[in-house]
Amino acid sequence: MKTRVRFAPSPTGPLHMGGVRTALYNYLYAKRRGGDFILRIEDTDSHRFVPGAEQYIIESLRWCGIVPDEGVGIGGPHAPYRQSERREIYRQYAEQLVASGHAYYAFDSAESLEQARAQAEASGQTFIYNSATRSAMCNSLTLSAEETERLLRETDTWTIRFKMPLGRTVQMDDLIRGHVEINSDTLDDKVLWKRADSLPTYHLANIVDDHLMEITEVIRGEEWLPSLPLHYLLYEAFGWQDSMPRFAHLPLLLKPVGNGKLSKRDGDKMGFPVFPLRWVSPTGEVSRGYREDGYFPEAFVNMLALLGWNPGTEQELFSMEELVEAFSLEKVSKSGAKFNPEKAKWFNREYLRGKDDAELAEAFLPLLEAQGVRADKAFVVKVVALIKERATFVSDFWDIAWYLFKAPTEYDPKDAAKFWKDENPARVQELAAFVRDFDGAFERDVIGPALEEYIRSREWPMGKVMNALRLALTGSGSGLGIADVAALIGKEEFLARVDRCCKYA
């Protein structure tokens, strides 16, 4: 049977990086087996729907290179892939469960449910709508057939609940966590369908769609593990045991410090994004994104892949093709994976260093234009080749080497006090005179040794003089090597900058 997996997010806000990892693992699993990856939007919870969230999900996956084979925005043999467009499908399956005795109609008002909860709390218990309590509630199991029919006709607040079996040990298998058992008496009779909006809940829609779309494995987050017994029992109630998908529940992404699930609050507090792309909420609240923070999608995906999955080797850098080849659920951890924002930066730094200089220069050019600099691309390529080992993001290039594009107009006060004193200003002027008369090639490997030899011939302190010269050329006593700076800015600019520093420093 062909492997078919799905990623089925709800459009209730921006896609968390944990959700992206779930999509990634589904994608890798499918591609490793020559199967299909489906994108389904589960938007049955109309109260939590957020405008723009669906498009955000689609754009996030596109940026990451996680391309669905079928689904929302693509189509396919099981369309539509948006659950709100499949609402007519679900009621018939909910009614089928009622007819077979696996579900029932419930007419309890919000007030009666709240009263039942309050009574349970007063006696030190927690109210659970299940085999122990449903006989005292208002439902088709306690009402006559005539009264049930009347309420179905005359009211629109009723629901269909699953009838959880009594005293049943539900035995389940998880591809990551192994064999799991639970007693059905600890589970509640979940709502499957609501008359108020004629929409199913997640549990019914999820099972029906996975069956109709021929899903072979359900790979989802750990938070859905408590729902697994219900889903097993729903497959059984429908008689779909033979086509039931295998389940795998992924470990949580944990916060860098302390315990608990990684949240937006952690990112805000510690200064890193938790969403793949920048998100602007309907109320105008802005959340950072990895793309806008300057991360390469390959670095982001590589980092996510290793949060919870271990290839079993020392290799850390993987292309998408290499991830597909190496991935298996057997190597996914049961325990949560702690996110390290510094490691995320490390991945981006490694990918930046491995990129072609021309590609990086192309990405740097718009940042230069934003600074009012129009530079020749060939020159920018040379600069990038020189500085990329010092950078983590393309945006770092300007901070590292702005002085290669603009002459300094100010000089670092601390460096000036330290290096621009005693005989050093006169020595720098003498070096400028030497450069003015220098007739050799003004290239790194020529002018650099020539300057050093001149300083040695005068028996000047090399470090102090070079730092004073760097101050004149770059505005500070730190930065790139003098030979690199001199070769890139050229002889004329070299002399102009020394002259300016001698006048104003």
Image (cartoon, rainbow, N blue to C red):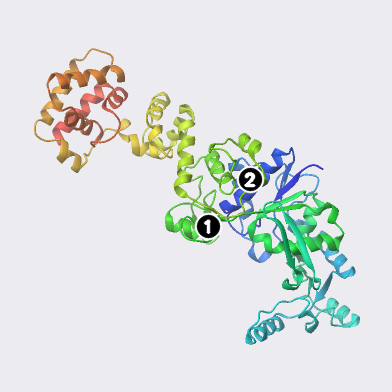
For numbered disc 2, what is the local secondary structure? helix
User: Which residue extends farthest top?
Assistant: 439
Most extreme residue toward the left is: 422
Whether 215 is drawn above or below 199: the answer is above
- Amino acid type shown at disc 2: Lys
Report the residue at 49% width, 40% height from top: 347
Q: Distance between the residues labelled 1 and 2?
A: 22 Å
At x 21% / y 26%, what residue is drawn?
496
**Image quadrant assignment for residue 380:** top left
Which is more toward the observer, 379 or 160?
160
**Is residue 153 depicted above or below 441 in this figure?**
below
- For image coordinates 77% across by 64% down, the residue present is 170
Whether residue 281 can be seen here:
yes
Q: What element does badge 1 sit on?
A: loop
Mark 2, residue position: 331
**Decide: marks 1, 2 in contact (CB < 8 A)?**
no
The answer to which quarter of the image holds residue 205 is bottom right
The answer to which of 318 and 418 lies nearer the viewer is 318
Looking at the rendered structure, the kind of residue marked 1 is Leu
Residue that label 1 marks: 262
Q: In which quarter of the image is the C terminus?
A: top left
Rendering quarter of residue 196: bottom right
Q: Which of marks 1 and 2 is nearer the N terminus?
A: 1
Residue 35 image point, x, y percent: 75, 40
Q: Is residue 387 left or right of residue 338?
A: left
Q: How crowded is mark 2: few (under 14 residues within 10 Å), some or many (20 or more)?
A: some
